[in-house]
Image (spheres, rainbow, N blue to C red):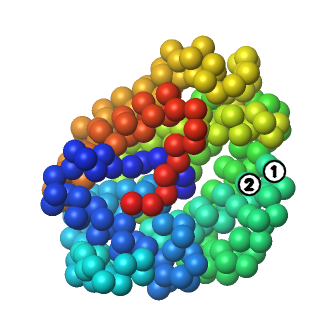
């Protein structure tokens, strides 16, 4: 995914922060075990959120043990243990990583992404594809729809964002199984739409300079990012806050017994901070590590 669904660490209770970090580090270690050590670079906040949400909705406790990280062999911390849910999230993440590389290669003929996909991701993707063939086929279909809209220079942000939003609803269906209801489906849809719009706003300057498609460059006057954000502040704020408010409304209807503090922090505060940051910063906002 993209790295925007982040916690507000400064306003987290300590118990929630340590638990969230254990989820993140546990997911990273699970990626290493299930795929390869190099694949651990792709550990993101977004997939960590999916792991927390899935454990919470399925009412499953994540076992946590004290351990060390490859980046710090001395200081011990809580790390989530490998379990069935986390392994499923790893496989979903692997499938998404493959299609993200494919999309980047299609968009800008990125040789580096083509190399990464072929030499690092592809063999792990093939294993994940066998386990979740329906999900893989659905994601492939939606990325093809997205590619067609991009080729047509579609100027409807709702239309192009719908493709990734639908991918997120399918991911929710696979991850949450029989616990998946309309409220969770709506949350995943609006989360996907928010993520797509966030990424488009974050990349608008880079896309303009490279002559790449971006829905916010269709029908918008563009000179530089600072002027773009200033001139279109109300429109951009409406798009992002509409998604954000819908997510909060969906979340309020969901009952969870575990990890509610983490989910509340990420959705209520972390995503609001990300929205504000995206609408004011001219440099890239994307985050990938805790």
Residue 197 lies in quadrant:
top right
Percent x, y for residue 14? Answer: 16, 57
Q: Nearer the viewer, residue 155 or 116?
A: 116
Q: Is residue 121 above or below residue 135?
A: below
Quadrant housing the C terminus? bottom left
Q: Residue at x 30, y 83 (%)?
A: 74
Task: Return the mark for residue 258.
Answer: none
Q: How many marks?
A: 2
Viewer-closest of 10 and 207 = 10
* Distance from Cα at disc 1 to Cα at disc 2: 6 Å
Going by the image, does 2 lie left or right of 190? Answer: right
Can you see residue 166? Answer: no
Is the residue marked by circle 1 packed among few (<14), some (14-19), or many (20+) residues within 10 Å? some
When the figure is inspected, residue 210 is found, relative to residue 45, above or below; the finding is above
Q: Secondary structure at mark 2?
A: helix
Q: Residues within 10 Å of mark 2 (few under 14, many from 20)?
A: some
Q: Is residue 285 above or below residue 31?
A: above
- Image location of residue 138, percent across then percent down: 63, 57
Question: Where is residue 28 drawn, in percent x and y?
Answer: 43, 73
Horizontally, residue 2 falls left or right of residue 244, namely right
Return the mark for residue 104: 2
Q: Relative to 110, say whether 159 is above or below.
A: above
What residue is rendered at 54% in x and 67% in y?
42
Q: Residue at x 27, y 58 (%)?
A: 57
Q: Residue at x 72, y 21 (%)?
A: 222
Whether residue 167 appears in this view of the structure is: yes
**Residue at the limit of the structure toward the front, as seen here:** 74
For the N terminus, give its image quadrant: bottom right
Q: Secondary structure at mark 1?
A: helix
Asked if labels 2 and 1 touch by Cβ distance under 8 angstroms, the answer is yes
Picture coordinates of residue 281, whole percent (x, y) = 52, 32
Dot label at residue 108? 1
């Amino acid at each position: 995914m993209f790295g925007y669904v982040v916690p507000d660490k400064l306003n987290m209770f300590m118990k929630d922060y340590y638990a969230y970090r254990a989820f993140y580090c546990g997911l990273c270690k699970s990626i290493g075990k299930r795929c390869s050590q190099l694949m651990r670079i792709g550990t993101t906040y977004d997939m960590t959120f999916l792991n927390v949400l899935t454990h919470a909705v399925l009412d499953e406790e994540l076992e946590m043990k004290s351990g060390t990280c490859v980046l710090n062999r001395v200081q011990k911390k809580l790390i989530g243990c490998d379990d069935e849910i986390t392994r499923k999230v790893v496989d979903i993440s692997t499938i998404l990583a493959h299609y993200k590389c494919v999309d980047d290669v299609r968009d800008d003929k990125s040789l580096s992404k083509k190399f990464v996909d072929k030499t690092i991701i592809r063999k792990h993707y093939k294993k994940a594809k066998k386990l979740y063939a329906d999900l893989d086929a659905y994601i492939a279909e939606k990325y093809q729809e997205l590619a067609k809209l991009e080729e047509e220079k579609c100027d409807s942000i709702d239309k192009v964002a719908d493709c990734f939003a639908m991918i997120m609803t399918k991911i929710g269906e696979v991850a949450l199984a029989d616990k998946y209801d309309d409220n969770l489906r709506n949350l995943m849809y609006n989360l996907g739409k928010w993520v797509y719009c966030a990424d488009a706003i974050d990349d608008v300057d880079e896309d303009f300079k490279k002559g790449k498609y971006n829905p916010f460059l269709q029908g918008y006057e563009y000179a530089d990012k600072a002027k773009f954000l200033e001139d279109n502040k109300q429109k951009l704020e409406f798009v992002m806050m509409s998604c954000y408010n819908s997510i909060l409304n969906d979340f309020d209807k969901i009952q969870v017994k575990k990890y509610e503090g983490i989910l509340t922090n990420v959705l209520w505060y972390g995503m609001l901070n990300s929205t504000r940051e995206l609408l004011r910063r001219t440099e890239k906002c994307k985050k990938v590590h805790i």
